[in-house]
Image (tube, grey):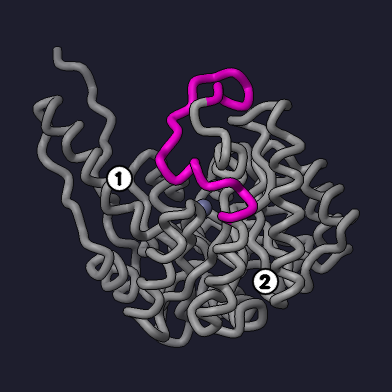
Amino acid sequence: MSKKHRVRDWAPLPPALPQDAHVIDNHTHVASVVPFSQALSHEAVEKGQPEIAVYSVDQLLDQAAAVGVEGVIDCGCELPHLMTAIDMAREHPGSVWAAIAIHPNEAVLHGHRGAPGPDGLPVRYKPWHDVPFDEAMTEVRRLAKAYPKQVVAIGETGMDLFRTGESAKEIQREAFRDHIAVAKELDLPMQIHDRDAHRDVIETLLADGAPRKTVFHSYSGDAEMGEIAREHGWYLSLSGASSYKGNTGILESAALVGLDHVMVETDAPYLTPMPYRGRPNAPMMIPYTLAALAEYLDTPVEQVARATRNTTREVYGI
Ligand SMILES: [Zn+2]
C-alpha cells in the first residue's frame, strides 16, 4: 500500500461574494506566495507527485477579484521588501496598498550579522542585516512619507516570543516602540504582529500610548484580551487561524469588539482557512474565513463581509 500523501495543491476557489459585499484582504504577502508555491511544486515533483501551479502576482490578484476580494494591503516587512510592496501598490492603484515595517524577527537580526541567534539558535543572516536597525527604521519612515498614497499602514511590527525567545525581548520591544512613534508621528494605522507576546505587546502599547488606529493583525488572543481591545478601541484583523479548531477565543473576541472593529486578512502564504489548512494561501481564500466568522455570529456572510469592508474603509481610508 502506498503512503497517503498530504495534499499541498491549491484549494478550490470559494464561492464569489455578491457584488455589493466585496472585501479587502487587510494583510497579506502576495509577492511571497509566488516563491512559496514554487517551492511546494518542486517538493511535489521530487516526491513523484503532480506539479503545483505557480501564479504570478497579477494572476493571484485577478483570482481574488473574481471571488469578490477587490483589493489587498500587501505587507513588506523586511528591508529589501519595503519597496516591493510600494511598487506593487504603484502598479495597481485602487486595488493594492502597502504596509511597511521591520518585522520583530528581523529587528533582532539587523546589525548583528555573524552573531549567534538571539536565543543561541543558528540564524540565517542575510546581507541586508548588516544595516543597523536604526538605519532600517529611518528607511521605513522615509518611504512612508515619500509614498503617502501607497503606504496606508506601519506594520507588521510588535513582538514575537515564539521564535526568538526571552533574550530578544527587549530588542523587539525597543523596535516596536520606534514603530509606534513613527505611526503616531505620521498618523498612520499600525498593524501589530503579536505571537505568544500578548502581555508584552499590550503593556508596551499602554506605556507609550497606542496609535489612533491600532490593528492586531492575525489576531490570536482570547476573550479576556478581546475585552482589553474593546476597552481601548483597538481593531482585530482575523486570518484563517480564526477558523481553526480550538481558536474560538478569536471569534469570541470578534463578537466582543463588534464588527465595526473587525477586519479580515489572509497573511498569505500561511494560515490557510479551514477546510483547507495546509494548502497554499492567497487573497482569494478570504471568503472561507468570512464563512467561519458568519457561522459563529449566526449572521449572513454578506452582512459580515459588508461590515468588515466598512471597517477597512474607516481604518485605512481605502
Ligand atoms: Zn504577515
Q: Does residue 10 appear left or right of residue 231 in this picture?
A: left
Q: Position of residue 110 (x, y in %)?
A: 56, 42
What label does residue 189 carry, if any?
A: 2
Q: Is residue 119 magenta?
A: yes
In the displayed structure, 198 sits above or below 61; it is above
Q: Position of residue 57 (x, y in %)?
A: 27, 64
Local packing at callout 2 (Cα closer than 10 Å; few below 14, some 14-19, many 20+) is: many
Residue bearing the label numbered 1: 36
In the displayed structure, 116 sits above or below 215; it is above
What label does residue 316 carry, if any?
A: none
Check disc 1 and give the amino acid type. Phe
Q: Which stretch did the figure color magenta?
A: 115-136
Task: Give the main secondary structure of the magenta stretch.
Answer: loop
Q: Tell me the quarter of the image containing the N terminus.
A: top left
As helix, strand or loop, the secondary structure at mark 1 comes to: helix
Q: Position of residue 239 (x, y in %)?
A: 54, 54
In the displayed structure, 23 sits above or below 293; it is below
- Examine the rendering and report whether any part of residue 307 can be seen: no
Q: Tell me the quarter of the image containing the C terminus.
A: bottom right
